[in-house]
Amino acid sequence: MAKWKACRNCKALTTENRCPICGSDDLTYNWEGIVAITDPLRSQLAKMLGHEKVGMYALRVW
Ligand SMILES: [Zn+2]
């Protein structure tokens, strides 16, 4: 997972230079923990973390 970056805005993980979820280019290698959101409408975890779209997210970004 070394090439993966996390978005500082929404915590989405990506290998691109731009966040696929919110479009931000404020990405960082400083993240840890992975959450996969597959069903944001039903997932309590997605609600708790504030993720509204399917995707991979970091638990912590700094
Ligand atoms: Zn983002």
Image: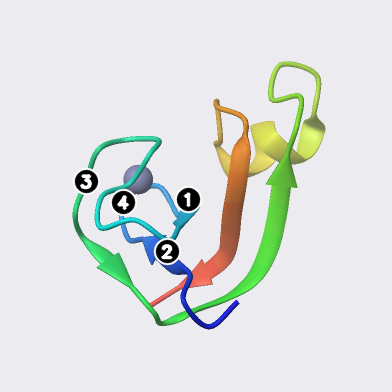
* Residue 9, numbered label: 4
Going from N to C along the chain, the mark reached first, 1 or 3, is 1
Quadrant where the image shows the C terminus: bottom left
- Label 3 beta carbon less than 8 Å to ligand 1: yes
* Alpha carbons under labels 2 and 4: distance apart: 9 Å
Question: Do callouts 3 and 4 mark residues in contact (Cβ within 8 Å)?
Answer: yes
Q: Does the residue labelled 4 lie within 8 Å of ligand 1?
A: yes
In the image, taking residue 27 as reference, residue 45 lies left or right, namely: right
Marks 3 and 2, Cα distance to the nearest angstrom? 10 Å
57 on left or right of 18: right
| C-beta proximity under 8 Å, tags 1 and 3 | no
Residue holding disc 3 = 24
The type of residue carrying mark 4 is Asn
Where 14 sits versus 42, above or below?
A: below
Q: Do the residues labelled 2 and 1 touch (CB within 8 Å)?
A: yes
What residue is shown with label 2? 6
